[in-house]
Amino acid sequence: AMASSNDEGALRQVAQALATLKANESFQRALEVPEVKRALKHWAGIERLPPEECEDWASDSAIMFVLGEFRRLEHVCRSAGMKVPLDVVVAGSDELKLADGRTLLAGEVVAKEKPKPSSIYDLEDLPPPAPGAWKRALFWQLITSGAVLLMTKITMDNQRDEITRRLDVAADVENMVDVGGAPAPEE
């Protein structure tokens, strides 16, 4: 069951036809009749029968019903560029995996799931940056850098005043105490 066409509408028709055949109890019962199975194998080219054995099929309503349904399915499959999924229909299923990873299920075309990346090298590429994005990034980097420089200047000015005050206090204390630890004589 290979899909050579990516026509979503034709694939949807195939999916709907498969779902209809799966739900059709008369069709499913008819598929179990041995003569219908033989006729179906002949129609599909699996087991060709001599013409004498095929002559009576026109008067067998079950065989004509099943072959008519398969002809309708064949028509929509041909529109989608694919072969009749005989095995799916005979199994009473409506699920058909396509070569491109999509699945026909319950009358719909289901897109394939993207596999989760197993490593950083399996990730999809990033989209290209917007034109002029570098200008915007540069502008905000300059604004941020200017704010950091301004805060640094204010902090250093405040600390310089505090350091100067502490050094002045330390110098005053040193002048009051002589080397031996006794207060310096006043003059």
Image (cartoon, grey):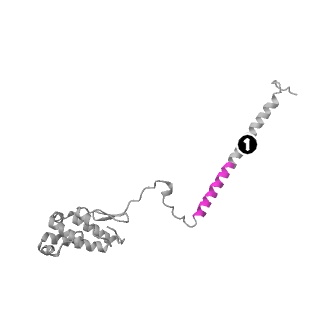
The amino acid beneath tag 1 is Asp
Q: Position of residue 10 (x, y in %)?
A: 31, 72
The residue under the point 82% across, 24% down is 180
Answer with the quarter of the image where residue 178 lies: top right
Residue 146 is covered by the magenta coloring: yes
Instruction: Locate residue 42 relative to residue 78 in the image: left or right.
Output: left
Tell which residue pokes out farthest to the front in this image. 50
Answer with the quarter of the image where residue 5 lies: bottom left
Q: Nearer the viewer, residue 75 or 134?
A: 75
Q: Nearer the viewer, residue 10 or 83?
A: 83
Q: Nearer the viewer, residue 115 or 38?
A: 38
In this rendering, is residue 168 above or below 186?
below
Q: Position of residue 69 (x, y in %)?
A: 20, 71
The quarter of the picture where the N terminus appears is bottom left
In this rendering, is residue 44 above or below 92?
below
Quickly name the residue at label 1.
Answer: 161
Give SS at disc 1: helix
Q: Position of residue 168 (x, y in %)?
A: 78, 37
The quarter of the picture where the C terminus appears is top right
Q: Main secondary structure of the magenta part?
A: helix
In this rendering, is residue 125 above or below 155?
below
Magenta-highlighted residues: 133-152
Residue 28 is covered by the magenta coloring: no
Answer with the quarter of the image where residue 131 lies: bottom right
The residue under the point 67% across, 52% down is 149
Q: Residues within 10 Å of mark 1 (few under 14, many from 20)?
A: few
Q: Position of residue 130 (x, y in %)?
A: 54, 65
Looking at the rendered structure, the number of numbered marks drawn on it comes to 1
The residue under the point 50% across, 55% down is 120
